């Protein structure tokens, strides 16, 4: 997660504004208002206790992290074929579950299992394969199923080493049984578009589109649901296998300790930072915000009293939304108008990889003047392919769909 803060000086009486300390031109009657502004990608999906190498009092932690590094850098004879970790029997179980779920493309996925995946080396040809990364065949299913925010405010976690899953795996087979149950059997209550619905892990997966990830072949795009499920299972299986081989009696204890310290209270810690450390911010542009966090934000007495929260009218399965917080005393609250639809209209008929919730835009009138601000927050896709089209679209809205006198303030994680 990254937070940027700045001070913006806006000329609020004329038709022009400037940022970062600019002054009104000589002879102008414009008055300047200084605004403190922050932009912060909350990284809602990042709940991996092992994401960063941190300071830990237990020497076993440093030993584990060093051994993982060595395993990835120089696996040697540990670089076994995928089928020695995730064997044909497990694939056939997975294939049958995918068929029962009603997916097309399972037979084609089985062909790729036999021809492309089962004989790959687990490190050099799978974990370190750049194409699997650019195609998002392992990271996309992880993104949408790693940590699921439930309707009651709690969370469900896919059985994997890289989240806050609260139970231990007694063995590799025990992990596999739990993984299958989470993906295909266990029902979860989630909120989607203001409605509560029952889903299983597999229902959260989204097709991977070539428009957004052009490294995909046409065949891979057509079978992206079963193919990413396979790659996700292989990915998690390799992680469990690796950790079981490096620290069989210790890694799960370390994961629980790290999750407690770093991840399990992430929303509460983020709210405290916004309420205290950044209490002087007038406008905060947020990206990758989970729906559950928006609810906690609106339920926080200090922050809800201080800010109007501008949120997308709809959000997608990825549960990563852009949000804008605007200090209530700064604006006329009744003037807030969502104009996200005007931005999205610019993408009609074009292959712009923007998902529901990625962008939010609104106009607001300042309380002490007739000046209107156009505010936008946006989280770019991994390769930054949408950044320029979105910036162009927001600029076009500012120039041609409004009065032309609005002052644009844009917080974005461009991913360029």
Image (cartoon, rainbow, N blue to C red):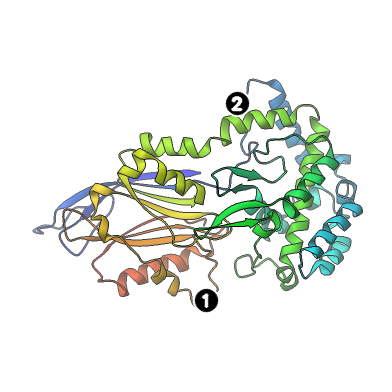
Q: Sort mark 2 into few (<14), some (14-19) or many (20+) by Cα contacts within 10 Å.
A: few
Q: Sort mark 1 into few (<14), some (14-19) or many (20+) by Cα contacts within 10 Å.
A: few
Task: Tell whether 322 sits left or right of 19.
Answer: right
Q: How far from the left and from the top, in percent, is residue 392?
A: 41, 69
Out of 234 and 2, give the one closest to the viewer: 234
Q: How far from the left and from the top, in percent, is residue 113?
A: 85, 61
Visible residue check, residue 226: yes
Visible residue check, residue 290: no
Task: Tell whether 138 sits left or right of 99.
Answer: left
The quadrant in which residue 408 appears is bottom left
**In the displayed structure, would residue 330 be above or below residue 67?**
below
Per the rendering, the mark at residue 161 is: none
Task: Tell whether 330 sits left or right of 66.
Answer: left
How far is the residue under mark 2 from the one under mark 1?
47 Å
Out of 108 and 202, give the one closest to the viewer: 202
Residue appearing at x 60%, y 66% in the figure: 212
**In the displayed structure, would residue 55 be above or below residue 102?**
above
Q: Secondary structure at mark 2?
A: loop
Residue appearing at x 53%, y 70% in the figure: 352
Out of 332 and 345, give the one closest to the viewer: 332
Q: Secondary structure at mark 1?
A: loop
Q: How far from the left and from the top, in percent, is residue 403?
A: 25, 71
Task: Tell whether 231 sits left or right of 261.
Answer: right
Q: Residue furthest bottom?
A: 349
Q: Which residue is mark 1?
A: 350
Residue appearing at x 18%, y 57% in the figure: 12
Residue appearing at x 67%, y 59% in the figure: 203
**In the displayed structure, would residue 149 be above or below residue 71?**
below
Q: Which residue is mark 2?
A: 55
Q: How far from the left and from the top, in percent, is residue 260?
A: 60, 30
**In the displayed structure, would residue 230 be above or below residue 328?**
below
């Amino acid at each position: 997660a990254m937070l940027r803060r700045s001070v913006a000086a806006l000329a609020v009486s004329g038709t022009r504004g400037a940022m970062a300390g600019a002054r009104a031109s000589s002879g102008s009657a414009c008055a300047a208002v200084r605004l403190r502004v922050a932009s912060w990608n909350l990284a809602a999906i990042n709940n991996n206790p092992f994401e960063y190498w941190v300071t830990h009092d237990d020497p076993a932690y440093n030993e584990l992290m060093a051994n993982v590094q060595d395993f990835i850098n120089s696996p040697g004879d540990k670089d076994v074929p995928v089928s020695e970790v995730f064997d044909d029997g497990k694939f056939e179980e997975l294939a049958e579950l995918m068929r029962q779920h009603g997916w097309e493309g399972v037979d084609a996925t089985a062909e790729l299992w036999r021809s492309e995946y089962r004989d790959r080396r687990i490190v050099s040809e799978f974990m370190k394969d750049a194409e699997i990364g650019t195609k998002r065949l392992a990271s996309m299913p992880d993104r949408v199923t790693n940590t699921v925010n439930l309707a009651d405010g709690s969370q469900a976690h896919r059985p994997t080493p890289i989240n806050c899953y609260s139970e231990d795996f007694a063995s590799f087979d025990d992990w596999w049984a739990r993984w299958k149950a989470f993906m295909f059997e266990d029902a979860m209550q989630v909120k989607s578009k203001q409605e509560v619905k029952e889903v299983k892990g597999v229902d959260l997966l989204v097709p991977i589109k070539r428009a957004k990830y052009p490294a995909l072949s046409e065949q891979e795009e057509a079978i992206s649901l079963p193919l990413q499920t396979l790659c996700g299972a292989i990915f998690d299986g390799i992680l469990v296998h690796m950790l079981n081989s490096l620290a069989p009696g210790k890694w799960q204890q370390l994961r629980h300790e790290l999750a407690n310290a770093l991840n399990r209270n992430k929303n509460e810690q983020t709210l405290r930072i916004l309420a205290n450390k950044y209490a002087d911010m007038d406008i905060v542009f947020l990206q990758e915000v989970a729906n559950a966090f928006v609810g906690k934000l609106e339920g926080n007495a200090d922050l809800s009293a201080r800010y109007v929260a501008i949120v997308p009218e709809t959000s997608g399965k990825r549960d990563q939304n852009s949000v804008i917080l605007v200090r209530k005393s700064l604006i006329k609250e009744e003037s807030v108008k969502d104009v996200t639809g005007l931005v999205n209209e610019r993408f009609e008929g074009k292959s712009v990889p923007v998902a529901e919730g990625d962008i939010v835009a609104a106009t607001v009138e300042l309380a002490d003047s007739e000046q209107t601000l156009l505010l936008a927050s946006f989280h770019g896709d991994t390769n930054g392919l949408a950044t320029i089209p979105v910036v162009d679209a927001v600029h076009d809205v500012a120039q041609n769909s409004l009065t032309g006198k609005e002052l644009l303030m844009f917080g974005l994680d461009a991913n360029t």
